[in-house]
Amino acid sequence: MDPMKLHFDVRDIFRAPRLALSGKKILVFVQALFVGYADYLILTYLSFTLAGYSFSETWSQYGLYPCLSGNPAPWYACVVYGIGVVCLLLAINFGCTAVSRITFKQLKGDEFYSSGDAWKYVKKHWHPVVFTSVSFAFILIFFFGMAAVFALVGKIPYVGDFLFVIPYLLYFFGAIFTIYTAIVFGVSFLYAPAIIAAYEEDTMGTVFNSYAITWSQPWRIILYHCVLIPIGALASYIFIKFWITGYHLINSFFGCDWFMGSKLANIVAYASNIVCPSSICNSVTACFSSCAGSCCSGLSGCVYAPNIDLASISGTETAAGVILAVFLFLLMLTAVGYILSILSVGETLMFVIFKKNSDDDNILERKDEDDIDEDEEIKDLSLTDDDSTDEENDSDSETNEENSTE
């Protein structure tokens, strides 16, 4: 398996949309998004219940996309909602790590590294995925806590004035380092999955590499993202356009009067009302119209929803609409998964480039833990074969000695 030939510069970033268009990468994100969003959905509806809202009232207003923010709620309901948000973010982070691992193996030349292998790796290395962000949070809390202590010391009459001005330079550089740490904290959200997946680092190693990347590669971070974001947006637009075109083709063919006709319209209307209610659709339309202009007008209509009286739909059409809504939701997750896949592949490529340019370390040529395990297995097999060969030779020699004695 020969590693993929890279230029180790900005030209490699253009590979991201193509490498991201992989069934197993998108499947990984669909799995992560489905689990994370299920946790978020359950906990958010639970938080609404704790806040005194009825389920029917919340469902009629939010449907599949509840959000407690902006609604009056007690602190414990907000805590439950916050846990749901954290679960969703962690699921996305685990998915990014798994896709980064698949990408790293693909760059090394291993095209047969499966999504199951990637999830096993994430299960083994979940600690740095979780505790890297926690470590940065504790660093920031420590500096702000120390600042609060020194500020309280400064309130001491007479002596406090001097205790503030004498170590002022220490306060100043501490403030600069705190600002820098906050920036590194943001950068770690981008590169921590790639560092864990490609460099196989623990929590401290991930924190250190985040500081090193931010310090040594700031302009490359900005430049490469200025390339990745536009090409990622274009690739995502084309991908979603294909999805929407296929959806409209099915509705146009099956919905003609010769075939299903109004029955299909009823099923699609019910499913669309679940997956993309009018309130969400109008918000998305306004967002695309104001932010993206006419170039993305084809994406602003959400999904085709016929103007049907939902109360007149039959029971079988309702059941079929629910099943169709599940499939439409999964298809929507694949579109989101492809967008996240582009970002994960791009960040992994960037990290490989950064290590080559800063440390002259081509990590694609290094042996990872899987390669080491394979070498150990081969070594154990060879030792076992040698032992069996020695036993056979010993038995043969004993047989020869007995024959000679006779």
Image (tube, grey):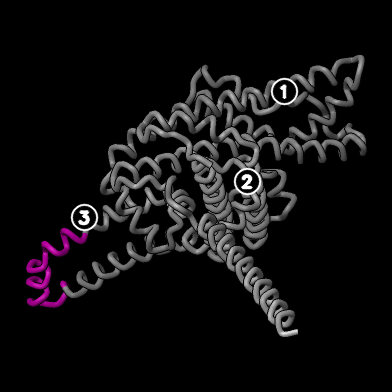
Q: Check disc 1 and report the residue beneath it.
A: 246
In the rendered view, would you say 243 is above or below 44?
A: above
- Counting residues from the start of the chain, the first of labels 1 and 2 encountered is 2
Depth order, front residue of 100/150: 100
Q: Residue at x 36, y 31 (%)?
A: 10
Tell me residue 194's x, y (percent).
45, 48
Name the amino acid, label 1: Gly
Q: Residue at x 56, y 25 (%)?
A: 237
Tell me residue 83's x, y (percent).
56, 60
Q: Check disc 2 and report the residue beneath it.
A: 28
Q: Nearer the viewer, mark 1 or mark 3?
A: 1
Whole-number angstrom distance, CA of label 1 to CA of label 3: 53 Å
Depth order, front residue of 343/63: 343
Whole-number angstrom distance, CA of label 2 to CA of label 3: 39 Å
Q: Check disc 3 and report the residue beneath it.
A: 176
Can residue 129 be seen by looking at this rendering? yes
Tell me residue 98's x, y (percent).
56, 50
Specify start and end residues of the magenta stretch as a single range: 154-174
Do residues under tags 2 and 3 come within 8 Å of each other at their CB atoms? no
Q: Residue at x 30, y 41 (%)?
A: 357
Name the amino acid, label 3: Ile
- Counting residues from the start of the chain, the first of labels 2 and 3 encountered is 2
Depth order, front residue of 245/354: 354
In the picture, measured across the screen, residue 302 lies left or right of residue 286, that is right
> Which secondary structure lies at badge 3?
helix
Q: Is residue 157 magenta?
A: yes
> Which secondary structure lies at badge 1?
helix
